[in-house]
Image (tube, helix red, strand yellow):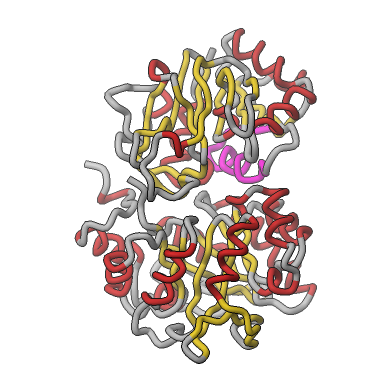
Amino acid sequence: MITKRIIPCLDVRDGRVVKGVNFQGLSDVSSPVELARYYSENGADELVFYDITASAEGRRLFTDILCEAARTVFIPLTVGGGINTVDDFDRVLKCGADKVSVNSGAIRDPSLVREAAKRYGDQCVVLSVDVKRVDGAFRVFARGGRDDTGMEAIGWIRRCVADGAGEVVVNSIDTDGVRGGFDHEMLAAVCDAVSVPVIASGGAGCAEDFVKLFRALPRVDAGLAASIFHFGEVRIRDLKQLLAKADIPVRLEGEYHHD
Amino acid sequence: MIAIVDYGVGNLFSLKSSLMAIGADGVVTADPEVLHSSDRILLPGVGAFGDAADKLRASGLAQVVVDEANAGKPVLGICLGMQMLFDRSFEYGEHAGLGLIPGEIRPIDEVIPAGYKIPHIGWNALDFGGKQSPLFRYIHDGDFVYFVHSYYAAKCDEHVIATAEYGAPLTAAVARDNVFGCQFHPEKSGTVGLNILKAFCEETR
């Protein structure tokens, strides 16, 4: 049976992870490579590297770090942030990324998803979308959730999936940072609209929020979070055992899988 | 030395890195001589079958892989590389494969129930179905590996060494003598995947 995926997201600026605390056995908490290795050894099913660098120098650093991470971490890697052209896909795929996530870049250039899917395959293109309710409607926001594009979100997601986006990350601005749980209503609307995997993001405050998510919405394929993992509030191994106890299929590895 | 066949399809960075991680000497190559002098051959692949098969033939490497396999050299196909080991594929038309393993590649929507998402993407458990393959000597029945595919190997029951349950049992791995194939990505399947590659790297003709 296919398992529900748990995905930590690492925000990287100028080659360093932006937020995080010290885990046991981790000498440098802001090293993306060390943190990636830590997560991959502790039950993460996939990793997202999000480049929030603005400068060209920072971008080069990010690409170097990605290469280094891909040399030592053998689970799927998704890269997002600053992906505006097919050349950007090429740049990160060459460094060992498996999937590339597009957000504002797809809004600026609506042919990007189609062109990238044609060249690299649908499985490689992840649509990431920041959604917020405006007058009761789901609207797409750009530039890290700062700008209201005026576009209706469900239609936008449908269109990108038709163009070849192989997965959709739905980040609810309404629940992001509130830590009161994922945005079930928004996620249900997206699951109703598309048949590709849907990844929930924004709102996880504790391990139980993941149980509630997968119980309420069995069609959601994965849960993504950053701070609750980085600050050590939720350990992925514990989270997965909690999910397994709730009869939600997860990948358990190592000490508690084998006899 | 393990030759990773480079015929212009996909990204071989992770595969080469994963071999390095297990202390194996992987060489990305498009040189028939290197394939010939290698101890083992890895045939990777992503994308569409027809395009990849055309490129493999155009590179002249298809025949080299077949000859080396027939001479007894261990060959492991990964993902689309596994699919190309078969007789033919029905992905967008009909395309000939290398014919090293009898069977054909068909869309998974022919066998899985409605409501299952396509592609089959994510971590799924291997079911050995009572078979014991040397490829799996370091892993266990029920271990999880990472899949991304919309087509599967059919009519090859005799050579299936593992399946994955996705509304129907999908072919996850195959073996015929010295020729092996994994539908999943061992280079993206954590420790379990590395242990599968390690087992392959110990196969000898």
Viewport quadrant of the C terminus of chain B: top right
- Tell me residue A89's x, y (percent): 71, 58
- Tell me residue A193's x, y (percent): 48, 64
| Left or right position of B63 against A76 | right
B24 falls in the magenta region: yes
Q: Is residue B184 above or below residue B54?
A: below
Viewport quadrant of the N terminus of chain B: top right
Q: Residue furthest top?
A: B71
- At 61% across and 45% down in the image, what residue appears? B14
Along the line of sight, which residue is nearer the eye, A105 or B143? A105
Q: Is residue B93 above or below residue A190?
A: above
- Tell me residue A189's x, y (percent): 43, 71
- At 35% across and 52% down in the image, what residue appears? A3
Q: Is residue A72 above or below residue B8?
A: below
Along the line of sight, which residue is nearer the eye, A12 or B48? B48
- Tell me residue A29's x, y (percent): 51, 73
- At 29% across and 27% down in the image, what residue appears? B129
| Left or right position of A189 against A125 | left
- At 64% across and 29% down in the image, what residue appears? B93
Does the rendering let one see residue B25?
no
Does the rendering let one see residue B49?
yes
Q: Which residues are magenta?
A: B11-27
Total numbered badges shown on the rendered structure? 0
B3 falls in the magenta region: no
